[in-house]
């Protein structure tokens, strides 16, 4: 009988993490005393690309911000851009409770080395390198939204939804930045005071880890999410596992490619110096066909 129960336990855990070669306690944060099996911050390895993934348990979190947060961020915009800033920042409202099923999300952004292996395996050409050249341990850049989505298919994962990305970045305590509520230029790759000239190796800012142990969720590169972008989506979005709108709306960013539907970007980049872009609630968007040296991605998987 003991053997039967052990087999059942193995099957249950495998059902939660069928992609994982192994599950281990995270070294970034303490593990809470939850139910048996996979717990908050546990780490597994995707056997397809060797990426570490952290577990974000099922449950509710607060998504978006309130008027006072918008007002604080608005102070960073020049006086002649206040109307634009308010329009842009209103996309983060209203603050609301969202329930997500448990999921895995990459601990780090997809690296140049990982993307290179994908290109070799799928006979895909690497994009033109950024001005600093390809550095294997840096986040992959110069990728379109479709490039990122194709990588996800190859690795047996996908791009995270906007809601999954935000929960992994801020946790359940409504924090402003992945590390807490106070802006700190030393906790992420940015140009506010660091004056960076390029991306940085993934995981370089250990003190900037999110509550689940995710790295670089502020700074380094803007990250593509699965969702189409709608400025007003939060007003009518479902409260359980939102997957983004079926169509775009309220977009002011120019889109020139064949797919004229902007996709969500999150997290800010090494080239940015405005605090608000690094806030967990900040919503960016851009042309899904664009390739630029400040944009990359990480992946996720819902069992």
Image: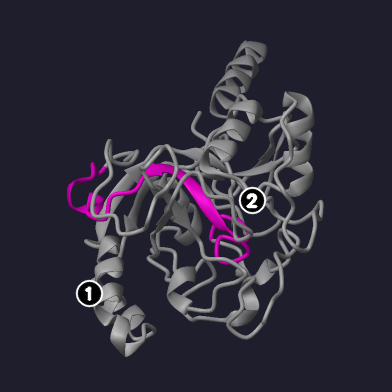
Horizontal side of 282 relative to 168 (left or right) equals left
Describe residue 113's horizontal placement relative to residue 233 as left or right.
right
Q: Which mark is residue 142?
A: 2
Residue closest to the far bottom: 79
Task: Return the x and y of residue 250 as percentages of the image width and height.
Answer: 23, 54
> Quick check: is 238 in the magenta stretch?
yes
2 vs 1, front mark: 2
Residue 225, given in percent of the width and then of the height, sits at: 47, 46
- 75 sits left or right of 146 in the view: left
Image quarter of residue 130: bottom right
Residue at x-position 74% and y-position 40%? 126
Q: At x 28% / y 50%, what residue is drawn? A: 230
In the rendered image, residue 74, in percent from the top left (x then y), is placed at 32, 81
Decide whether residue 276 is among the magenta residues: no
Compared with residue 30, is residue 151 higher up or lower down, i.e. above or below?
Answer: above
Q: Is residue 78 above or below residue 191?
A: below
């Amino acid at each position: 009988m003991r053997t039967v129960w052990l087999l059942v336990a193995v099957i249950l855990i495998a059902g939660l993490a069928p992609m994982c070669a192994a599950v281990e306690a995270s070294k970034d944060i303490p593990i809470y005393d939850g139910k048996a099996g996979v717990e908050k911050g546990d780490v597994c390895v995707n056997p397809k690309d060797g990426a570490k993934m952290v577990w974000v348990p099922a449950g509710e979190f607060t998504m978006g911000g309130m008027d006072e947060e918008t007002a604080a961020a608005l102070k960073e915009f020049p006086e002649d851009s206040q109307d634009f800033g308010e329009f842009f920042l209103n996309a983060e409202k209203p603050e609301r409770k969202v329930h997500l099923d448990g999921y895995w999300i990459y601990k780090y952004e997809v690296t140049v080395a990982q993307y290179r292996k994908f290109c070799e395996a799928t006979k895909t050409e690497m994009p033109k390198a950024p001005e600093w050249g390809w550095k294997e341990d840096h986040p992959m850049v110069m990728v379109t939204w479709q490039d990122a989505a194709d990588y996800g298919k190859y690795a047996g994962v996908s791009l995270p939804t906007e809601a999954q990305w935000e929960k992994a970045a801020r946790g359940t305590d409504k924090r402003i930045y992945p590390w807490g509520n106070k802006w700190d230029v030393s906790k992420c790759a940015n140009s506010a005071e660091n004056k960076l000239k390029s991306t940085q190796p993934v995981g370089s800012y250990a003190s900037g880890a999110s509550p689940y142990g995710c790295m670089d969720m502020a700074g380094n590169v803007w990250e593509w999410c699965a969702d189409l972008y709608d400025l007003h989506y939060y007003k009518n979005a479902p409260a359980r596992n939102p997957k983004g709108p079926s169509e775009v709306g309220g977009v002011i960013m120019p889109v020139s490619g064949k797919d004229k539907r902007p996709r969500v970007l999150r997290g800010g980049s090494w080239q940015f110096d405005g605090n608000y872009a690094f806030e967990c609630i900040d919503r960016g968007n851009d042309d899904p066909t664009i390739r630029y040296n400040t944009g990359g991605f990480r992946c996720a998987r819902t069992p």
